[in-house]
Image (tube, coloured by chain):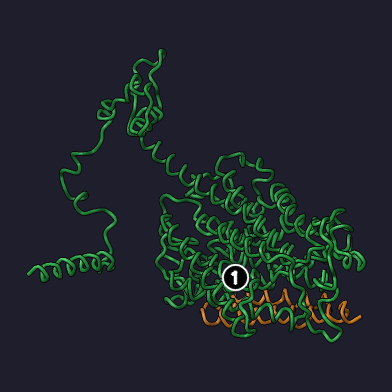
Amino acid sequence: MRKTSSLLVIFLSLASFAFAQAPTATPAPATPPAAASSPAAAATAITNADLKGIAAPDPKVRANGDPNGDLTGNVSDITVADPITDKTPKAKGLTIGDIANQVGQNKIAINFVWTLVTGFLVMFMQAGFAVVETGLCRAKNANHTMMMNFMVYGVGMLAYWLIGFAIQEGGVGAVANLGGSPVLSREFVVTLFGKPFGLWGQGGYFLMHGGAYDVFVMVLFLFQMVFMDTALTIVTGAAAERWKYAAFMASSFVMGAFTYPLFANWAWGGGWLANLGANFGLGHGYADFAGSGVVHAVGGITALAVSMLIGPRIGKFTRQGKPVAMPGHDLVIVLTGCFILAFGWFGFNPGSTLGASGNGNLRIGSIAVNTMLAGMTGSFGAMLYMWLRYGKPDASMTGNGLLAGLVAITAPSGFVNPVGSCILGLIAGVLVCLSVEFVEKVLKIDDPVGAISVHGTNGLWGVICVGLFADGKSDYGGSWGGVNGAVTGLFYGDAGQLVAQLIGCATLIGFVFSFSFVLNWIIDAVVGQRVGSKAELEGLDLPEMGALCYPEFALKPEATGA
Amino acid sequence: MIIAGIIVTLLGFLVAVASLGMTASVSGRMILVLIGLAVSLGGIIGVLNPAYLKNAIWKR
């Protein structure tokens, strides 16, 4: 009997657990029926008279301290619109309007804090990129590579503050999650095929022009600025060990001022790509949740243009064109940097909701989990590929596999489910290995850190993944790209979304590449992109930077290739 | 050859954009965009890169 009872209890427990996890057959209504229909609900409505009866804690009690926090944060912390003063003795005191204002400000405050803190995380990714790239380069170029990664932050920020932000976000319009301020509403628009094509923003120069001295604009600038800098720092890896420092400065400035902001405007700033759904019926338009295309593909494709322009390092290819391995000098900092980047990605993707409260923003948990899952499967994909193909689980490629998975999930992170994330991450991990081999063996382009493959190839893959794996379950305020409903990919029934994503890819490969190439071609003609052979062989630390990174270590060329 | 490569690469982008006005069908646009992508990739891989490889540092 006791045994039967125990079994019954276990069965009931499991059954209740199963029912708790099972999806409901019909979606729950937005408003609980009881609250909507019960007359008692109306009787509990708060009135201004109720509010007048709420007493703040006695100041004498507060004077004794508040060790458990019961007294801190109460009605006295809500600002009263018309406080009773000597001049207005008949003021109303606390009203429903005051509370509504406080609730609204709390919501926006949560979103501001969320966006700022995630922006701080993304900023820290600069450190990750710096050590990954430096570790994958030879010791004789460590100072030069670190300095490029260090100063790309300042150069990019300057360009973006002066010009880039206005081009990207000058016409973005009101962002509901950040308070709905209309100060950035100047988009340059042309008409093509009878539809408006937004091309660039025209407001917010110096964060002062056209009312841009605004709390919302400051939050948006910080968040978008660190994204832009991420794109810029991708190029420094691909061009490392032979890029003239002055050319790097000029190239990074024009990328932060023009190349990145232009495409970012088209995708995120109210430009024509984002409106492909509303104007041409292609799904929800080009959808790039956190920037596989905007950040990573722009960076990777610019890296391809610059690498092609400046040519490979001396000794990278034999006279027959066979690639020669040039191992980096510190795998410890490479993999540490990968972890720093993976940590920063929790700012990159979940932060791209631009809020944590309202408009479906509680999906941040799902976005964070998708991010970590794709990174995990990406590292597995690369490690297993290298292990099976070359007999060893290569460390640097495993690190690149992690990054490839993270790059690929960046665009779809807000639209896909965990299984989709794992699949696309796994493919990204294999794809990065194949791409590295293709770039090196077929194109004969030298990319010391694999930036073209990690960010370019997998950035494009991430963009395509939105058009394949988006499951139609996300709901960010009921619409995306000016089209009602959720972003849905081909596997869930919307082929138009895939076409919009492919137009984004064609823009990245066709326009962004050409634009970057021409800009860097001009820089090459004016200042020269490549260092001299003597400086390259000696290592760029002394000729370009004037100091060795590791002055107390004797570098042995015959042993290390340094 | 370098200028030709840039022109071909840009041409692919223009084909993809032109698909928006040339047809209203999803499959028609898909085909045109894929053609555009192929043209752009051809411009980079088939024209521009070989132009640079002609004078590659490892061939000297």
Looking at the image, can residue A220 be seen? Answer: yes
Q: What chain is the green one?
A: A
Tell me the quadrant of the picture where the C terminus of chain A can be found: bottom right
A213 relative to A77 in the view: left or right: right
Image location of residue A358, percent across then percent down: 41, 51
**Amino acid tagged 1:** Ala
**Which percent across, then down, holds residue A244?**
85, 61
Query: Residue A166's x, y, as percent?
Result: 66, 50
**Quarter-of-image position of residue A302:** bottom right
Q: Which residue is mark 1?
A: A404
**Residue A194 is at least partly visible in this image:** no
What residue lies at 92% left-to-right and 80% top-to-bottom? B60
Q: Is residue A350 above or below residue A463?
A: above
Q: In the rendered image, which quarter is residue A69 located in?
A: top left
Q: Secondary structure at mark 1?
A: helix
Identify the subunit bearing mark 1: A
Q: Check the rendered structure and report the hue given to chain B.
A: orange
A445 or A2, nearer to the observer: A2
Q: Which quarter of the rendered picture does the N terminus of chain A lie within?
A: bottom left
Query: Tag 1: Cα neighbours inside 10 Å, few (<14), some, or many (≥20)?
Result: many
Horizontal and vertical percent for residue A29?
27, 58
User: Considering only vertical position in the picture, is A387 above or below A265?
Assistant: below
